[in-house]
């Protein structure tokens, strides 16, 4: 059995990554903004805690702007992440991306966690006293395990350096490749 601390470190590392946050927000976008706005808006990227959202036209951008506080609260609930700011831009919203996100979200909700995964969640949250925090960590962890399971099933592989799941023929994930390149340049 993998030591719980390592697993936790891994999760915290991935949760802090803008890539993970962007993925979670994209998957939960319909749930966050509702059916109507989900067709006209899209998460573009997450950087330094700032979420950039694209709206298909000025009227939709205004509506989002007007509902920014609500949006911030819903993001916090859905992704357990408090955005520093939400920036709204007008741009092209790709409908196929929303369809894809919806399909993945459905697949994720149908995935069954293994007994090992369930006990890993229980062990991880066991030392947490605050019941609210306990519940929150358990939910984030479950989300993480579901997405990891989904990625493995869809041909992702584990980076030998940081354990993140990525796609492609390279030996390391994109983040490690950048870091390794930097190390080489410094030496
Ligand atoms: Zn890596």
Image: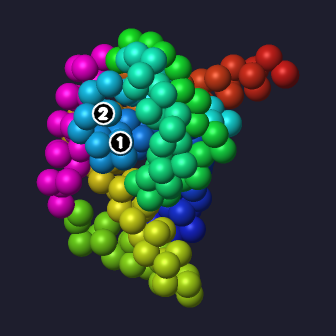
Q: Position of residue 19 (x, y in %)?
A: 51, 35
Q: Residue at x 48, y 50 (%)?
A: 70
**Residue nearest the viewer, comparing 156 with 130:** 130
The magenta region covers 94-112
Q: Is residue 185 left or right of residue 78?
A: right
Outermost residue to the bottom: 129
Q: Is residue 117 left or right of residue 110?
A: right
Tell me: residue 165, above or below residue 42. Answer: below
The rendered magenta stretch, by its main secondary structure, is classed as helix
Q: Residue at x 75, y 22 (%)?
A: 182
Residue 113 higher or lower than 82, as above or below:
below
Q: How far across and how far down the image is residue 117, in percent? A: 31, 66
Query: Total of numbered circles in the picture?
Result: 2
User: Which residue is pictured at 85% across the width and 22% down the height?
Assistant: 187
Q: Which residue is nearer to you in this view: 61 or 155? A: 61
Q: Are marks 1 and 2 in contact (CB under 8 Å)?
A: yes
Question: Is disc 1 placed on a helix, strand or loop?
Answer: helix
Q: Horizontally, is 62 left or right of 92 in the view?
A: right
Q: Which residue is mark 2?
A: 38
Query: Label 1: which residue?
Result: 33
Disc 1 and disc 2: Cα gap in Å? Answer: 6 Å
- Residue 128: quarter of image: bottom right
Q: Residues within 10 Å of mark 2 (few under 14, many from 20)?
A: many
On the question of residue 87 being in view, the answer is yes
Q: Which image quadrant: the N terminus?
A: bottom left
Camera-side residue of 100 and 124: 100
């Amino acid at each position: 059995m993998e030591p719980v601390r390592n697993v936790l470190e891994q999760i915290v590392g991935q949760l802090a990554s803008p890539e993970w946050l962007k993925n979670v927000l994209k998957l939960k976008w319909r749930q966050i903004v509702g059916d109507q706005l989900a067709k006209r808006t899209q998460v573009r990227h997450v950087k330094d805690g700032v979420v950039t959202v694209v709206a298909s036209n000025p009227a939709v951008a205004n509506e989002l702007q007007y509902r920014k506080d609500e949006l911030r609260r819903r993001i916090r609930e859905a992704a357990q992440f408090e955005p520093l700011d939400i920036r709204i831009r007008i741009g092209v919203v790709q409908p196929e991306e929303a369809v894809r996100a919806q399909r993945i979200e459905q697949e994720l909700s149908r995935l069954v966690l293994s007994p090992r995964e369930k006990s890993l969640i229980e062990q991880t949250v066991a030392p947490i006293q605050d019941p609210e925090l306990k519940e929150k960590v358990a939910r984030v962890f479950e989300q993480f395990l579901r997405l990891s399971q989904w990625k493995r099933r869809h041909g992702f592989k584990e980076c030998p350096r940081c354990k993140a799941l990525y796609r492609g023929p390279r030996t390391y994930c994109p983040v490690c490749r950048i870091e390794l390149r930097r190390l080489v340049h410094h030496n």
